[in-house]
Structure formats: C-alpha cells, structure tokens
Image (cartoon, rainbow, N blue to C red):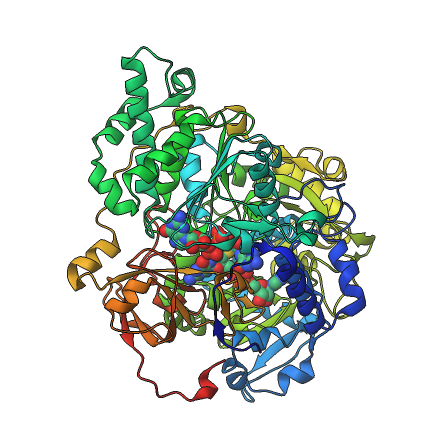
Amino acid sequence: MSKKTIQVYDRPAGGWGALKSVAQQIFEQGIPAKGARTLLSANQPDGFDCPGCAWPDKDHTSTFEFCENGAKAVAAESTARRATPELISQHTVAYLAAQPDFWLENLGRLTQPMQYDPASDRYQTVSWEQAFELVAERLNALPSPNDAIFYTSGRASNEAAFLYQLFVREFGTNNFPDCSNMCHEPSGFAMRESVGIGKGTVLLSDFHVAEAIFIFGQNPGTNHPRMLGELREASKRGAAIVSFNPLRERGLEKFQDPQSTIEMIADKATSISSSYHQVKIGGDLAAVKGIIKCTLEADQAAQAAGKPRVIDVDFIAEHTANFDAFAADVLAEPWDVIVTESGLTREQIQRSADIYMKAKSVIACWGMGITQHKHSVATIQMIVNMLLLRGNIGRPGAGPCPVRGHSNVQGDRTMGIYEKPSPAFLDRLGQVFDFTPPRENGYDTVGAIGAMLAEPNKVFFALGGNFATATPDTDATHKALRNCALTVHVTTKLNRSHLVHGREALILPCLGRTEIDMQETGPQAVSVEDSMSMVHLSSGINAPASKHLLSEPMIVARLAAATLKNRSKTPWMSLVADYDRIRDKIAMVLDDFADFNNRVKVPGGFHLRNTASERVWNTATKKANFKAHRVPTDLPIHRAREKHGRQVFNLSTTRSHDQYNTTIYGMNDRYRGVFGERRVLFINKEDIEQLGMKAGSWVDIESLGEDGVHREAKRFMLVEYNIPRGCLASYFPETNNLVPLSSFADFARTPTSKSIPVLLTPHQAKETASAVH
Ligand SMILES: Nc1nc2c(c(=O)[nH]1)N[C@H]1C(S)=C(S)[C@@H](COP(=O)(O)OP(=O)(O)OC[C@H]3O[C@@H](n4cnc5c(=O)[nH]c(N)nc54)[C@H](O)[C@@H]3O)O[C@H]1N2
Ligand SMILES: Nc1nc2c(c(=O)[nH]1)N[C@H]1C(S)=C(S)[C@@H](COP(=O)(O)OP(=O)(O)OC[C@H]3O[C@@H](n4cnc5c(=O)[nH]c(N)nc54)[C@H](O)[C@@H]3O)O[C@H]1N2
Ligand SMILES: [Mo]
C-alpha cells in the first residue's frame, strides 16, 4: 500500500508515469511472462477487444496501441491469483463483507460455481448442473415472470447479450436494468428525440479533420486514454480543443504519448486543450446556451450588415424543425442567468462561441459530467442544438460523440438489452424464434431497486457488473438485494454484490474476454460494438483461469434450457456449439446485421448504419429537431441552497485513475496528486477557509435529499483543488450512499451522481489508524 500523500502533479498525462504504473500492476498480479504477450494482443485483428473502455481502435491492422488503463484492465483479468473454493469457504460471508473492495478484488479469479450456505454463513461449491436446476426451479415458481429481474453490465458480448435477452423474453419479462441506465441513457434518449438515433455519428476519421473539438464532462486521461492520442494529433495540426470541466484534469491539459519515442526521450509533451472552462457543476446547459446566443447574435449582426450568414441557413431550412421557436427562446434567455448558472464569464462564453463560429467542422464529445444530472437530457439536446446551428452533423469532421464507458455497452443495447423494447423489435424476435414476447415495459435500474424494496422474494440475476456497489442509495439498494429470494451473479471475480445477497445465492464464474472460449466445434470468437458503431470480433488467447469456467453464452444457454425446457423452440445447445449460429440468428432479427458472419470476419469488422450521419432523420417530424430548454434555476441544488443557505455544496462523484468503476486497482489518483487514500474531497481553497478548516482536515458529508431520508458518508479528507467555489468532487463508489434513489435525470432516470447537494461538518475523530484502508 502506498504512502498517503497529496501533492501537485505537474507532469503530463501518459509518459513514463504510465509505463511505470503498468509495470507495477503486472508485477503485483504475478503475470511476468504471459503479461506482455497478453497486452500485445489487445485490440489486434486476431486478438481480443480490450475490456477497458468503448473508445474505438485506431485501425485493426495497425501496431499495438499502448494504453495504461487498458493494460490495467487486461492485467486485472489475467491475474495469476485464484479465489478458489478453499479460499472463499475458509471465511464467513460476514467476514468477507467486512473487507474493503480492494481486498476482494485481490483474491483473484473465481474458479468454481458456489452456493451460499446459510447454516455456516459461507459460500460452498456446487455443481453447474445443480446451480442451473436451482435457478430454473426458483424462476418457474415465481407468481409472475415479472418478479424476476435480469441485470446486465456492459462487458457482455453481443452473442451473450442476444441469447440473454432472448431467454429472458421467452421466460416472459422485459425487466432489463443495465449499467447504461446509470451511464449514457440520457444521451440515447436526447439524441433519439433530436436526430432520430441514440448513438454518436462520428468516426475516428472525423477526429483527423475536425477544426474544433468541444469536450464536456469527460476525463479521457483516465477513462479513455486512447482518446488522448487522437486529441494530441488534433492539437498538433492546430485544431482547437475546448474543454468544459469544473476540475482541472491533467489529461485535458498535457499529454506525453508513450508511443512517441521523441516525446518520451526528450521528455516533451503536447498541450491538449486550447481553452479550458471551469464550469460550475451542472452549468453546461447554461454555457452551451450562451454559446448559441452569441452565435445567433453574431448572425443577426451579419445579416444587418449584409455579410454572409453565420448559421447554416440552408441546412436549417432543409433538415431541421422548430428553429424559430428555439431561436426566440435562446434570445430571450437573460445573460445574467447564463453567467450565474454556468459559472463562466460572458467573455469566456464569447471566446468559445468565436471558436465555434470560426471552425468549419466541430465535434462535441461528452461523458458522465453531462449525463448524471437531473437536467442531463436537456443539456445533451442543447449540445446537439449547438451542432445543428452550423450543420455540424452528417459531414466530415463534425458531429455528436457521446463517449461510452463499458467496452460493449452500446452493443448490448443494439442486441436488445433494453427495458423498453420497440414493438418492431419484439415482433421480429417473436417471428424468428416462434414465441410471443412480453409487451409490457420492464424495470430500469432505479425501478428495479424500488420494486425489490417494495416486494420481497424476487429473483435477481446479474450478467456481470457489481449492482450492490454501482447503484445509488447504497443502504436502500443493499436492503433491496437482501429482500430477494435468490440472487445470482455471473462474474469473473468476487465483489460486494455477492456478499449482499438474497435468502439463497449463487456465484457463477465465467471466462473473461482474454481467454480461449472452446466449444464443441472449436475455439469461438465473440463480437462487440464500440462507441463509434464499429462491430468487430474478439478472440481470447489465454488458457482459462480454471477448467470449471463456462462462457457467458454457455451459461445463458444452459440456464435457458433448464428453465424453459420444452416450452422453448430455440435450439439453445446447438446455438452455443458454434457462435456463428448465434450470429446468423442475430442477422435474422436485426436488418443492420445482414450477412453478419461474413462482414464481421474482415479485420476491423464493419460499421453499423447510422442514419443521422447520412442526414436521414428518424424522428416524428422526419427532421432534426431544435429543442428549446430554459436554463434551469430550480434544481435540487437551488432548492437546497434556498432552504439551508449558501453553505450547501454541490458534490460530483467521479473516478480515480486507479479504478475501473467499482473495481479498485490501487489507492492512487496520480494525475490529481492523491496517493494512498480514496476518502478525499476536492474543494476550493477559499471554501476551506470559509468553513474555518484546513486542507487535510476530515469531514462528514450529509446529503440533502428531498425525500427526508438521512444519508451521510463519514470521514473524508479535504484536498485543496482547482475547482469552482461551491463545488466538490469525490470518488465513486465511496459516496454512492449520498445519491437518493428518488433523484434521477428527467426522462432518462440516470441517478444524479454528479450533482448531490450536501453539507459538510467536521469529523469527530473516534477511529483509530486501522480504519484507514
Ligand atoms: N480506467 C477507467 N476507464 C473507464 C472507467 C473507469 O472507471 N476506469 N469507466 C468506464 C465507464 S463505464 C464510463 S461511463 C466512462 C466514464 O468516463 P468519464 O465520462 O470521464 O467519467 P468520470 O470519471 O465520472 O468523469 C467525469 C468528468 O466530468 C467532470 N464533471 C463532473 N461534473 C461535471 C459537470 O457538471 N460538468 C462538466 N462539464 N464536467 C463535470 C469530472 O470532473 C470528470 O472529469 O469511462 C469508462 N472507462
Ligand atoms: N456515484 C456514482 N455511481 C456510478 C457512476 C458514477 O460516476 N458515480 N457511474 C455509473 C456508470 S457510468 C456505470 S457504467 C456503472 C457500472 O456498473 P457495473 O457495470 O455494474 O459495475 P462494474 O464495476 O463495471 O462491474 C465490475 C464487475 O464486473 C465483473 N466482471 C468483470 N469482467 C467480467 C466479465 O467478463 N464477465 C462477467 N460476467 N463479469 C465480469 C466483475 O465481477 C467486476 O467486479 O456504475 C454507475 N455508478
Ligand atoms: Mo458507464
């Protein structure tokens, strides 16, 4: 464990620090020889898709692209450590549950299916056969199929996800909460209304020609390190990069590319952002509306002076609807509201607008800093409005680019992991597999927690992920899971969700993506879809972590066969004998996957059709819609400040550099200068002074939810940081308990993990040093 220190990190992102960190991780996971070969096979035509993020691969035939956090994700999966039954059953679940997440992760890969034994409070081995029979029996005994809930995390392959949604729908429910419900759900919702498709329209090639790239609420240095390579190239050729982020993030400032011999040897770096705007948390809608206002005002002035128009009038006339009402709304929005709510000066907004207006092509990227607020959908639609103004969609170098998280989260949705499936999709699924799919919408993540809380005895099944820790309102979620009759987790490693379990519980260990998936007809490849809609194959290269592991498609198929028995006409076991057969079925259900097997076998795969990128608008108006939204001035943070005064802070929960969502790799956050500690709270210097405290003091955080429930998180260290006044940042998942279940994005229902009104009080130190983990 590293020493606890806080210091300013003045090095660029990437560089030698990245190489050192990876070397250390490979050493700690005990994978000396194999490690290097495994890393070199990530994102290669005959290798596996990196289980890190959803950023696309440069070119499948290009050389190895180094990525620190991709390497950490791969190393974590190919660890030499094994969480054997002997190791797990040595401890009671009560003991395991008392250990930190970091400790659980470090037990290594699970090797055999295990079942919870209440008499001894331990997990004990169980055969696969018995495990499937148990789940089948419990599912079939439920009063209604809607009493079962089937969660998915975004690592599941297309093949696994397709079989899973088919099984669950043949079983009879659309209860598909998924990680997307906590992630880019608002992007899909907002874009479907605005441009008729819920996915980004740009390709990597657009990054090569864009004249300006706007980045909202994203920390690519940590979460999409390979994106920095593209930004570095863009910066070098003179493209403007404009970042909006309350925190100064190192990766958005300077990057030293570990692949560039010159930068590494000369210890040079490339500047990334040409301008950096520290918006207030939740202030992006106001900022973007301000940019649009400047653009419209400039257009009016140009028109009055008889100069060329600033906005793309031809595009607007031919391709869009609702422009006039939208423009009137923007022009009526007072500047003082825009300035106050964005936290930026009018000059800063004007400068951003000048860059926007000057650039012939603009890409807008965004991440969780945009999607996890109450007004996320409105903010995303405002970003799309900005692009539409100058026709920045459906032409080279321009377009919206929501940067997805999990490596196949976009593909899982394409495959039908969705609680609100379209009637057309269900019709086709029913025809191809000869059954009657359920029509009623299912539960999303927030809905599923509510339902498990309200009614006991549900069956909760998870294909990957860590539901207990990733979800909001930890106390409520844990209660919900404990309320279940049965909880089942398909997983690679032990995590908290297995320890916060139902009356009965199973852990089903599966192959990881780096491993060879051998089935009856030989080794199998799976397919994934990245953030830019490229679909390609992934084949594991390592021997499985244990001979008892099953692949995810096999687990789903065997469970379906056990549960549905002769109710199903689907040839489950034949499908998993050869995944080409699954892909043939996918092609029969989804037109965009016609000739799937042949197209996906080309190195690099193929690009899924994206209608908006062709300027075909699948919206109700058959046009791209301008959507008017007032700058919100009555959000929970405003109401909390009205009630409790100005000492209320807005807390945003974010990722450290040493974690993958709920998986904690280490205790450092190198680029933010934090070492050896995760219970930290980033805060402005003047706010620390006003609180009468000092950097390094410990505080408790009280959440000011509007449902009257008391929520708090104890013992966080104040870290002085370059962040606007009134704003705080801390790590997820330590702060998840502060997010009320009832606080979520309008329409899309993502928990508001990036804007939690809180109060701080000094922590009354009772703990001893042992409480520091
Ligand atoms: N190494 C690594 N890679 C990952 C992940 C990981 O945990 N580790 N997670 C994966 C997943 S599932 C996802 S979704 C992505 C997440 O990747 P990101 O979208 O980068 O997610 P966060 O780390 O939550 O960071 C969000 C950024 O938004 C900023 N921010 C917070 N509030 C606001 C706001 O109101 N406005 C603006 N403009 N900015 C704000 C924060 O300061 C931070 O820089 O990464 C994926 N890749
Ligand atoms: N407060 C707060 N909460 C958040 C967020 C936030 O920014 N702030 N971010 C949200 C976001 S964007 C997301 S996407 C969710 C993430 O929610 P999840 O996807 O549920 O969480 P992960 O931590 O990614 O899941 C990690 C677990 O997946 C399992 N796993 C790993 N690889 C495999 C595999 O190949 N197969 C299977 N079956 N299992 C595997 C391991 O058991 C590991 O412990 O969290 C959300 N929660
Ligand atoms: Mo995510």
Q: Residue at x 33, y 75 (%)?
A: 699
Q: Is residue 73 visible?
A: no
The residue lying furthest to the top in this view is 306
Q: Residue at x 46, y 52 (%)?
A: 183
Near-viewer residue (708 or 296): 296
Q: Quadrant of residue 701?
A: bottom left
In the rendered view, tell whether residue 130 sits above or below residue 318. Answer: below
Where residue 430 sits in the image (x, y, percent)? 57, 41
Is 661 placed left or right of 713 in the picture?
A: right
Q: Quadrant of residue 752?
A: bottom left
Near-viewer residue (637 or 287): 287
Where residue 658 sits in the image (x, y, percent)? 56, 65
In the rendered view, tell whether residue 219 sits above or below residue 80. Answer: above
The residue lying furthest to the front in this view is 266
The residue lying furthest to the right in this view is 522
Q: Is residue 738 visible?
A: yes
Where residue 346 sits in the image (x, y, percent)? 28, 38
Counting the numbered discs, the total is: 0
Is 438 placed left or right of 281 in the picture?
A: right
In the rendered view, tell whether residue 289 sits above or below residue 105. Answer: above
Where residue 245 sits in the image (x, y, percent)? 41, 50
Classify the position of the N terminus by image quarter.
bottom right
In the rendered view, tell whether residue 641 sits above or below residue 304. Answer: below
